[in-house]
């Protein structure tokens, strides 16, 4: 991955090309979700945790390289974020790529990464504004996973979300929480089919299939 500050000419060229030909371009930002991975650090020394985190970062870089297209540009910034510039990519396509990367990192390392995205020209017109928008979306995420949670690829999880131990989210699940209305899912819950949860609470051992819940308490 290149450093952002050393890639300004390349970045400018991609933005200029998208603007000239009126084509979409998306910026995708990734970072290790430190809060949701803190359980994995217990029982290790500070040095061991530092080595484990360095290994995870290197592995994530490899996964990004494997899954990105030849036309995508993979960057790192001084804050430790991974940034992917994806030409010819709209908001729907960037979501598919992001979820593939999240699933690959989870399968390979059993760690959670957060992500945010922004798309030119719908959401911003310059690279700096795209990056800022994507980072703000990433920072708003607060995903906490307990042990033995299984999340199938293709699901969408956004915002302030807690998922309890042993819960399974099969394909087609869309979960959105906010600071005022977080989503809290209890232990050993199974959610499957095309299901949507917004700002809801789900009790332990619940079964949900093909349902939509807005600001609900599912017992």
Image (cartoon, grey):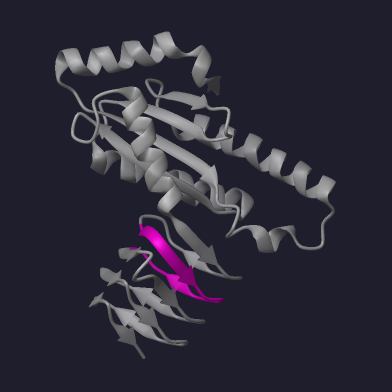
In percent of the image, x 37 and y 75: which residue is there? 191
- In this rendering, the answer to whether 98 lies above or below 7 is below
- Viewer can see residue 98: no
- In this rendering, the answer to whether 215 lies above or below 117 is below
Q: Quadrant of the C terminus?
A: bottom left
Q: Which residues are magenta?
A: 155-171
Residue 154 part of the magenta-drawn span: no
- In this rendering, the answer to whether 172 lies above or below 72 is below
In the image, residue 164 lies at what x, y percent? 52, 76
In the image, residue 145 lies at what x, y percent? 54, 66
Number of callouts: 0
Quarter of the rendering containing residue 88 = top left
- Viewer can see residue 123: yes
In percent of the image, x 43 and y 75: which residue is there? 184
Q: Quadrant of the N terminus?
A: top right
Quarter of the rendering containing residue 122 = top left
In percent of the image, x 33 and y 86: which residue is there? 218
In the image, residue 120 lies at what x, y percent? 24, 29
Q: Nearer the viewer, residue 68 or 3?
A: 3
Q: Nearer the viewer, residue 164 or 65?
A: 164
Residue found at the very far left of the displayed protein:
22
- In this rendering, the answer to whether 21 lies above or below 147 is above
Question: Viewed as shown, does residue 39 lie left or right of 47?
Answer: left
């Amino acid at each position: 991955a290149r450093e952002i500050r050393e890639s300004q000419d390349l970045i400018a060229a991609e933005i200029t090309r998208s603007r000239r030909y009126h084509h979409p371009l998306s910026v995708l930002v990734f970072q290790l979700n430190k809060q949701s991975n803190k359980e994995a650090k217990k029982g290790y020394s500070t040095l061991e945790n530092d080595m484990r985190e360095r290994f995870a970062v290197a592995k994530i870089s490899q996964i990004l390289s494997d899954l990105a297209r030849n036309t995508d540009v993979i960057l790192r910034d001084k804050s430790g974020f991974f940034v992917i510039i994806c030409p010819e990519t709209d908001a729907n396509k960037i979501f598919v790529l992001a979820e593939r990367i999240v699933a690959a990192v989870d399968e390979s390392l059993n760690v959670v990464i957060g992500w945010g995205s922004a798309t030119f020209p719908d959401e911003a017109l310059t690279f700096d504004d795209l990056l800022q928008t994507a980072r703000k979306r990433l920072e708003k995420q607060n995903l906490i996973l307990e042990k033995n949670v299984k999340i199938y690829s293709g699901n969408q999880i956004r915002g302030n979300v807690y998922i309890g131990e042993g819960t399974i989210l099969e394909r087609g699940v869309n979960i959105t929480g906010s600071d005022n209305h977080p989503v809290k899912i209890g232990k050993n819950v199974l959610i499957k089919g095309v299901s949507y949860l917004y700002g809801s609470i789900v009790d332990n051992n619940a079964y949900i299939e093909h349902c939509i819940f807005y600001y609900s308490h599912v017992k």
